[in-house]
Amino acid sequence: MESKQQPNLIYIFADQWRRQAVGYEDEDQVLTPNIDAFAGESVVFSNAVTCSPLCSPHRASLLTGRYPMSTGVYTNCKIGADVMLSPEETCISDVLADAGYQTGYIGKWHLDLPELNVSAEPESGAKDWDAYTPPGPKRHGFQHWYSYGAWDEHLSPHYWQDNPEKIQVNQWSVEHETDQALQFIKNRSSNQSFALFLSWNPPHSPFDQVPEKYRQLYNGEQIMLRENVNQSTFGVHTGEPVDGGLEELRETQMNYFAAISGIDDQFGRILQLLKDEKLDENTILVLTSDHGEMMGSHGLMAKHVWYEESIGVPFCLRWPKVMGPARTDVLLNTVDIMPTLLSLLQLDIPNSVEGTDLSSFLIKRECQGPEAAYMCAYPGRKEAIEAFRDAGLDNRAYGWRAVRTKLFTYVIHHGYAPGDERIRLLYDLEKDKFQLQPEKIEDPFVHPIAKELEQQLRTWLKDMEDPFLL
């Protein structure tokens, strides 16, 4: 019987979906009834963060359990940067395939070298940052493949399977990829366990590419902006500045919420199929994202900054057969996901992993988890890389590094251009939820809290052999 097999795994992650933008968090005014009900049956991590709030670095760390400095994927896989996930890395999917799982990947991959870095006219027709990843070691054990590299056309997406012929679709990408996921589950082999990774691109920009039926759920005039919208901190210039006025931002935020409600709708279809197929009891189901979205907070859009709207992700894990529902403040970082899932599946964790196995907390509630989560961001824009190299500097020694505990975020920011000022900031997350009053630290070694966090961060940087300049 299927119930006696190893548990199945379904890992679903959206792109640029912040922790605050889900109903059960009771922060943003977003409608997510299916997800809220699912959260009530799950272990919900209210302190889940990304180790690097950018697409490719997060994805590489998710699959390997290793930090960006170790994987080499420190910035997005894009034109002009020789960055991609090495075929020699051991990913969770490699372990699953070796253990006899049916493995599948559907949706955005963004871990391969853009084909235009190699050929001016790739056979697949890939443009810009996009890439067709052919069968072989670069797929890391994923047997069923319905994917693309990086392309932000949500209403007219495209995909590749096992040859360079592009599959063009006129359907909202989340709905189409959910169709594919349901088909994968229905067509599974009955005598094998399966592991499916489903990567939705929305609510990633462009935000207006969302079906009208989800926009109609909202009245834009009644949507409130967060209290830290259009604020600034010590003139730190990171992320993308807000364009347009508050009314335009309100419209953009409504579209963002609409996409998340669309995700909720499609997620409900997956929940129903698992119930219909009697798979829900013995399937580990995870719903999360790769990083957040600033949406005007601190005067910024997008991500790649240390604020909670950027680093915080929703994270719900359900396995009814083994664990009951709970909400926890245990810290969960990207690098912890791979070892935790492998341990839950009773599979060996590779020696290369740098994250923490949190399975004992999930099953026995005995582990308090790591006391800190470490995060990093590097200057990765083509112009920035060239500017550092022209100055004889390593761009990876700049950007920012941060340590986040349950109570504080401590950041050292060394800039995105040669000559930028280095600053240290301490945020009290309990007293200053919206991070509007950071303490600027001149000398961390005379400050009791900053001193401890500085030492923790320095130890981590040394362990990672990170060239970051302190």
Image (cartoon, rainbow, N blue to C red):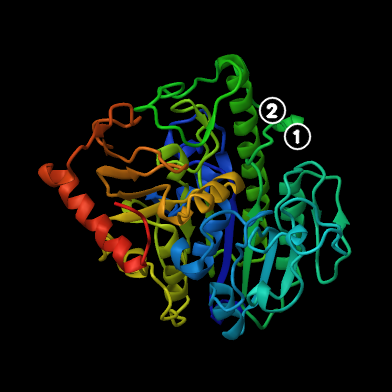
* Placement of 175 over or under 254, stated as above or below: below
Q: Residues within 10 Å of mark 1 (few under 14, many from 20)?
A: some
Decide which of 281, 32 is in the foreground and name it: 32
| Residue 269 can be seen, yes or no | yes
Q: Dot 2 lies on which element?
A: helix
* Residue where numbered disc 2 is placed: 215
Name the residue located 62 percent from the left edge and 37 percent from the top edge. 261
Q: Is residue 51 shown left or right of residue 29?
A: left
State which quadrant residue 106 falls in: bottom right
Q: Are marks 2 and 1 in contact (CB under 8 Å)?
A: yes
Decide which of 185, 146 is in the foreground and name it: 146
Instruction: Provide residue 320's location: percent of width, then percent of height.
Output: 47, 63
Instruction: Provide residue 128's location: percent of width, then percent of height.
Output: 75, 50
* Placement of 153 over or under 288, stated as above or below: above
Q: Amino acid at mark 1?
A: Pro
Q: Is residue 261 shown left or right of residue 186?
A: left
Decide which of 57, 264 is in the foreground and name it: 57
Q: Amino acid at mark 2?
A: Arg
- Which numbered disc covers residue 258? none
The CA span between labels 2 and 1 is 7 Å
Q: Residues within 10 Å of mark 2 (few under 14, many from 20)?
A: some
Decide which of 232, 166 is in the foreground and name it: 232
Instruction: Provide residue 6's location: percent of width, then percent of height.
Output: 54, 79
* Residue where numbered disc 1 is placed: 211
Name the residue located 47 percent from the left edge and 81 percent from the top edge. 347
* Placement of 117 over or under 9, stated as above or below: above
State which quadrant residue 114 falls in: bottom right
Which quarter of the image is occupied by the N terminus?
Answer: bottom right
Q: Dot 1 lies on which element?
A: loop
Name the residue located 86 percent from the left edge and 57 percent from the top edge. 125
Instruction: Provide residue 269's location: percent of width, then percent of height.
Output: 68, 51
